[in-house]
Amino acid sequence: MASSKKHENYDDIAMITLDHVSKSYTNDGIPALNDVSLEIEKGEFVFIVGDSGSGKSTMIKLLLRELKPSTGRIIVNNCDLAKLTQRKIPKYRRNIGCVFQDFRLLKDRNVYENVAFAQRVIEVPTKKIKKNVPAMLSLVGLPEKYKSKIRQLSGGEQQRVALARALVNNPPILLADEPTGNLDPRNSWEIMKLLEEINRRGTTVVVVTHNREIVNAMRKRVITVKKGVIVSDEEKGEYIDED
Amino acid sequence: MKISTFIFTFKQGFKNIFRNKLFSLATIATIAACIFLFGVFYSLVVNVQYSIAKAETNVAVTVFFNEDISEDQIQQIGEMIRGRSEVSSVEYVSASDAWESFKVDYLGEYADGYEGDNPLEGSENFEIYLKDVSKQPELVAWLETVDGVREINHSDVTANILTQFNKMLSYVSLGIIGILLAVSLFLISNTVSMGIAARREEIGIMKLIGATNFVVRFPFLIEGVLLGLIGAGIPLAAVYYMYNYITKYAEDHFVILNDLLQFQSPMEIFSVLIPVAMILGVGLGFFGSFISVKRYLRV
């Protein structure tokens, strides 16, 4: 059964806190998330699993402050998202690396420009960008592809670029929404290994997925969401069937 | 904001033009086509109006005097006429001037039989030219009250036709210019916003990475201004070249029409065309981008 950890003081230690969070897209419909409470500690690696429409992606959108919760409170890295003005959202997002199923890369730019863009927006000096970007591309295994256009890359390579972009600013949190959804098994495993390595270096990693094989093999914390409700939260958990 | 960020966003604006070639071409073509049409029509209307205005200045009212009037009295009347606000110029034609001119125009070598004689004795007159031919009835009414004036020759029909035609042309051209401007406004802003709508994903990605509105928007604004500048510059250059060529050609090859065809100087035409083209091109490029990008910034 669910074993969501609870703290009285959210600003204390948890990296991510959702406190009785609900989100409805319509006034009368079933909520996408219904009274969800959870905490993710600094340096944790967490899988959020569940079928399509279970509310996993809504959770990511709430954490990225793409959406506001209908009720409840979200605190990320000591930042209460309810108090975040529109103006402060960019600064908040710079502390969160994010990776998506569809990669979301700037397709008209090359690999280097995509990764460097994340540094440009936080106004890193050009000299440092020239040092940081190749280092990050080496970490994800694409040091020679820096000049390649995004369209010239395979799905796996594109996701590596997305990962490099997400990590180049050393964010304390990495959110990955179905990072292996468009990849073959070999590339999926390589991406997961990279995420594990990133986590080992201290980054809190939250992966939304429905890749049963990966979840079961990696033996990490698994939060299962069903119809907008957390039905299971297990350390070294497994993918639980809907039925 | 750091100067390097400003330079980076500025450069992105330039690069975006080449990254989105199709959008850039479509925008430039739309702006250029609208401004070209506007430029051609505007030049045409201004020149027709200019020719009419020139024709109006050639419409004269001729005033003849009583036979018993002295030369001093005639000159006094002349001064009164010159003092009128609607009068552009007054020419005094003496009886001998009138006869000399008549001989040249109508008699030629047959004038020899009138040696020492002036059949136009007593026909000294003032030719009065008006600034605005529509004021002719006003002037004629006043002249009829002046002592010593025997006869006033004027053509109400010519004055009326010119006045009415000028008025009609003003209304029609204002209407067409208005429609052209409205269509241009619609087409250009539509092209700009469609182009940006196609790139809303790009805007969304930038916002998710943590880019500020300025960093996202500024390259689009630079792009909009540059496309507007190119889109306005091309038709302006084309219209300028065409205008000079056509006016020169008409003056050289249609000499017989030189009295009728009067062309405005390019300076006069372009002192209006350049600001209008800039507002249409650069202004719409800038504000179109600003408004369209704003729509997608709330991510």
Image: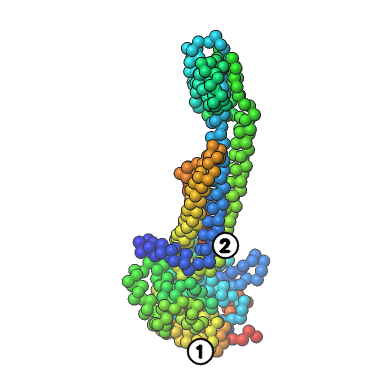
The amino acid type found where label 2 is placed reads Met
Foreground pick, B179 / B151: B151
Secondary structure under the numbered disc 1 in the rendered image: helix
Q: Is residue B54 above or below residue A154?
A: above
* Tag 2 and tag 1, C-beta contact below 8 Å: no
For the N terminus of chain B, the quadrant is bottom left
Q: Position of residue B231 (x, y in %)?
A: 50, 57
Q: Position of residue B117 (x, y in %)?
A: 53, 15
- Check chain identity for marks 2 and 1: say if they share one: no
Q: Is residue B250 above or below residue A229?
A: above
Foreground pick, B245 / B115: B115
Q: Which numbered dot is residue A186? A: 1
Secondary structure under the numbered disc 2 in the rendered image: helix
Foreground pick, B182 / A201: B182
The amino acid type found where label 1 is placed reads Arg
Pointer 2: residues within 10 angstroms few (<14), some, or many (20+)?
A: some
Residue visible at 47% across and 53% down in the picture: B237
Disc 2: host chain: B
Q: Position of residue B174 (x, y in %)?
A: 59, 42
**Which quadrant of the figure has residue B121?**
top right
- Farthest residue in the top direction? B68
Q: Position of residue B138 (x, y in %)?
A: 59, 23
Q: Which numbered dot is residue B194? A: 2
Q: Is residue B118 above or below residue B236?
A: above
Residue visible at 63% across and 33% down in the picture: B161
Pointer 1: residues within 10 angstroms few (<14), some, or many (20+)?
A: few
Q: Is residue A90 above or below residue B96?
A: below
